[in-house]
Amino acid sequence: MLALAGLGVASLAAWVAQLGWPFELFVHFRPQYGVAAALLAIAFLLMRRPGFAVFATFIAVVHLWPGGSGRQTLASGAHCTGGALTVVTANLDYHNTNSRPFIDWLTREPADLVLLQEVTPEWAAALEAVPGYPHRRLLIRADPYGLGVLSRWPTDRLAVRDLAADGLPSLVGSLQVGRQTLMLAAVHTHWPLLPGLMSRRDLAVSRLAQEIRQHPGPWIAGGDFNLTPYSPVFRALLEESGLRETRSRAAWAPSWGAGFWPLAMRIDHVLVTRELCAEPSEVGPDIGSDHRPVRVRLHLPVAG
């Protein structure tokens, strides 16, 4: 009964996540709430407590129902016949000193564009061993907010942007892929455990949406957003920017804390605008980080 009461309180907090901190923190665990409530419903049935079983079932349905986290528009379609582009985003973890698992995986399964977070001087040196990326842009830092872009295509038009005006860099600009020009944003927002950090994360996300609206065309936005698809902030980003997800919310695919189910979340994303099509994104293997990489194969429109 205490567990059911706790689930009820957490569900109520998630329901009013639009009020901001601290309520928004609860909305990211909706799959866990749903599974826990379903298990409690079974337990109450075995205990012959039908009233509590019905309440637990209601909570489970609210969180697990496919449309319960809002409307989703996936980046898919048949209008993209201009070639393919494989994109990877990976938070390397600035505490992670073992670069070999990631480098081996990327060498074994290469991508055309790699977006990296938490790039330290040690990681920058290790990445020199990764072949096949003549175009590199690294913003090296000793804290968790270094960024990097490895690309088979020119990246010299990427500019450093401070979206939240707090010293955290993003890389925003154009990427020339053959004869086509794509817009690219590589981001890493704040971990929103405190009110000030959450407000800066939300400001960065809002300004990213403004940037995309001001420069129409095909966009790729990837990185560690510190947002799950269940957050109202994430939904606002999609609605205001026109970005689309590359993986169904019905698929259980946590990219952070994947080894510990109760806290696992999907906070690493590759998002694209409607001009691009995407095969469902995949979560990669354990690379020694607290995050797992996300990989997606995009299909481009026909070059004009």
Image (cartoon, grey):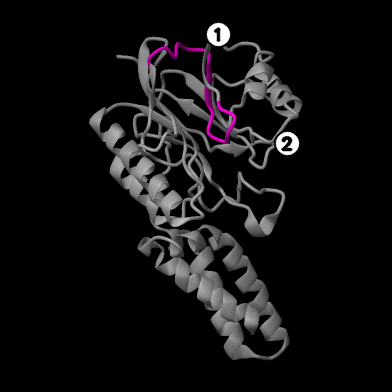
Q: Mark 1 Cα within 10 Å, few/some/many (few <14, many 20+)?
A: few
The residue type indicated by label 1 comes to Pro
| Residue 173 occupies quadrant | top left
Name the residue located 64 percent from the left edge and 78 percent from the top edge. Answer: 3
Relative to 66, residue 227 above or below: above
Name the residue located 66 percent from the left edge and 15 percent from the top edge. Answer: 130
> Front-most of 102 and 25?
25
**Which numbered disc, 1 or 2, marks the residue that appears first in the sequence?**
1
> Front-most of 207 and 167?
167
Position of the N terminus, as image quadrant, is: bottom right
Name the residue located 68 percent from the left edge and 56 percent from the top edge. Answer: 261
| Residue 203 occupies quadrant | top left
> Front-most of 117 and 182?
117
**Residues in magenta?**
141-157
Judge from the rendering whether residue 175 lies leftward or rightward of residue 258; answer left or right. Answer: left
Q: What is the magenta segment's predominant secondary structure?
A: loop
Which residue is disc 2 drawn over? 288
Judge from the rendering whether residue 166 lies leftward or rightward of residue 6; answer left or right. Answer: left
Coordinates of residue 140 in the picture (x, y in percent) = 55, 23
